[in-house]
Amino acid sequence: MADSRPPGTVSPTETRRHRILLVDDEPEVLTIVGNLLALADYEVDQAADGPTALKNVTENRPDLVLLDLIMPGMSGEDVLRRLKFNPVTKEIPVIVLSALDESGVMGRCRKAGALDYLVKPVDTEVLLTAIDKALLGHERPERIQQIRRTLEEKNRAAPVLGLHAPSRNRDVDSLRQELAELIGSIQPVLKDFETRLSTTRYQHPQIEELDAVAIRIDELEALLASLGDWARRARDEF
């Protein structure tokens, strides 16, 4: 008798459905990607922030984590590092799904242990292929095409996920993260320069212009501290 089950479904005698944790602070992404994963017959858990994601991973042990990077409070990179540092969760594959299309960020995520890095907006076939490879070790093109046709027929989602231009909040969050990273790269260099400047001023007190440089360094540190406060501030006020 021919199998009448829809593509992607499993019978009670087959291998259990894979569980995926979707981590994103955008409700629209949680809804659209969550529906897609459910249609692809994955069990889906959702988390809108880093602490909730870490708690879910510890309690439910998903087979895969789809992880956004720009989130309020704990960033996706922090979540990734904690998952990979924990012996209990380090083997769980993580695919980053982010609007940040920057080689430096991609490199850090891969170095931290991300299996793949997909940039929003992402085509449904690209996303499902990456997930299949991570969980099964191979692609299922016929199944993916069937899911795509089903989406188009029911108009349940656009072919491209992540759908619209980034919201104003997401733009601001991206700037905050970039600024925090910039300040983080400047501060060690500035600290080293300040130490050498202090030594030189002590050895050559007669060089008055060094005093003026020290004052400007203090002003620069105050400016960086102020910018750092803005970069760390919760985005809810915007």
Image (cartoon, grey):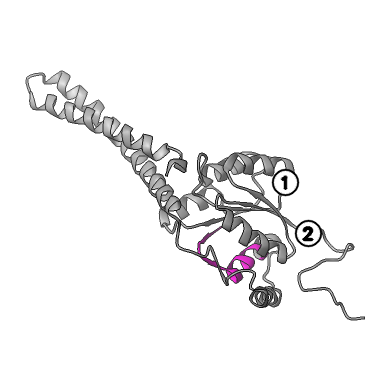
Q: Around disc 2, counting alpha carbons within 10 Å, would you say few (fewer than 14), some (14 to 19), or many (20 or more)?
A: some
Residue lying at 49% horizontally and 49% vertically, measured from the top left: 70
Q: Residue 85 got which mark?
A: none
Image side of residue 54 versus residue 216, left or right:
right
Whether residue 151 is in magenta: the answer is no
Q: Residue furthest right?
A: 1
Q: For mark 2, what is the residue?
A: 17
| Numbered disc 1: secondary structure | loop
Magenta stretch in the rendered image: 116-132
**Camera-nearest residue between 209 and 148:** 148
Q: For the residue labelled by badge 2, is the local secondary structure a helix, a strand or a loop?
A: loop
Q: Quick check: 16 above or below 235? A: below
Tell which residue pokes out farthest to the bottom in this image: 2
Residue at (62% x, 62% y) in the render: 32
What amino acid type should be assigned to the residue bearing mark 2? Arg
The disc label shown at residue 61, or none = 1
